[in-house]
Image: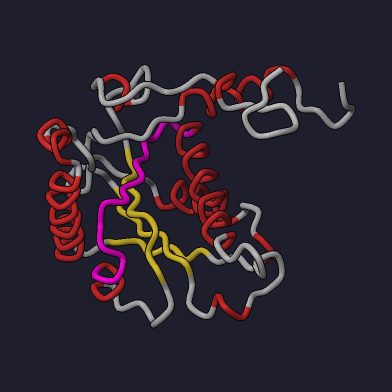
């Protein structure tokens, strides 16, 4: 074992947070103490980013009118998504897809404007800015789970409509509405699996040996 490895107890905690992280939709109100929220956002901010561009921007939504407006945008997209799903639309409408009105804290994560000036690591893969923001969101998720808080990533919204609502500059793009706060319990498995929407695939089906589709 590497001399730089954490202790067995510390490693177990890391793997537990990863294994028990859930995309939460059910929240129990309450609050997130300011110092805890600051700690979680600092964890998010420590994420890796291509070219150290740190493309993420976090907006804490504290105004009730904005929270309600965001909920309306999500509901609009929920209906459009159901229509696009065709025969699965009815089943989709039975799923709980957000906890915007119930969570203690509502955040929006956006990509900054002016991203085109950052070429390092993005000349052939410009979407690495989004990958970097996703790393920040994952950091936030794992830290929240370790702190005993639930978190849900909502992506059902029109990005331009949300950007306009929050007065983002041209070029900035919202990528996530984050519901965060206390929960009564954590799902024992991914909610979509529990609801029968889909089943997670085992790693062995997604791991190839050298060439695409080749398995050992």
Picture quarter containing residue 7?
top right
Residue at position x 28%, y 72% in the image: 166
Above/below status of 37 relative to 197: below
How many numbered marks, from 0 up?
0
Please state if 130 lies on the left or on the right of 156 as rendered: right
Picture quarter containing residue 129?
bottom right
Q: Position of residue 96 (x, y in %)?
A: 19, 35
Residue at position x 37%, y 64% in the image: 174
Residue at position x 47%, y 67% in the image: 111
Question: Magenta segment: does it hold 26?
Answer: no
Picture quarter containing residue 193?
top left
Q: How is the image coloured?
A: secondary structure
Quarter of the image with the N terminus is: top right
Q: Nearer the viewer, residue 191 or 87?
A: 87
Bounds of the magenta segment: 147-161
Q: Position of residue 170 (x, y in %)?
A: 39, 82
Q: Position of residue 2 (x, y in %)?
A: 88, 26
Residue at position x 51%, y 23% in the image: 19
Above/below status of 137 relative to 114: above
Q: Position of residue 93 (x, y in %)?
A: 12, 37
Q: Nearer the viewer, residue 8 or 161?
A: 161
Above/below status of 171 relative to 214: below
Please state if 100 lies on the left or on the right of 152 as rendered: left
Quarter of the image with the C terminus is: top right
Question: Magenta segment: does it hold 148?
Answer: yes
């Amino acid at each position: 074992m590497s001399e730089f490895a954490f202790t067995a107890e510390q490693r177990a905690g890391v793997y537990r947070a990863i294994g028990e992280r859930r995309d939460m939709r059910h929240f129990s109100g309450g609050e997130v103490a300011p110092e805890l929220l600051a700690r979680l956002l600092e964890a998010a901010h420590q994420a890796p980013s291509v070219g150290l561009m740190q493309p993420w921007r976090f907006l804490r939504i504290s105004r009730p009118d904005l929270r309600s407006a965001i909920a309306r945008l999500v509901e609009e997209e929920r209906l459009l998504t159901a229509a696009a799903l065709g025969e699965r639309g009815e089943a989709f409408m039975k799923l709980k897809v957000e906890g915007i009105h119930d969570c203690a804290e509502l955040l929006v994560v956006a990509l900054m404007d002016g991203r085109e000036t950052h070429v390092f690591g993005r000349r052939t893969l410009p979407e690495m800015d989004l990958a970097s923001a996703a790393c920040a969101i994952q950091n936030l998720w794992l830290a929240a789970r370790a702190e005993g808080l639930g978190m849900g990533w909502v992506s059902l919204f029109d990005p331009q409509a949300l950007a306009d609502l929050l007065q983002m500059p041209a070029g900035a793009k919202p990528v996530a509405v984050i519901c965060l706060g206390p929960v009564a319990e954590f799902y024992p498995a991914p909610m979509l699996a529990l609801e029968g929407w889909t089943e997670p695939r085992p790693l062995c089906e997604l791991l190839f040996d050298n060439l695409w589709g080749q398995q050992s």
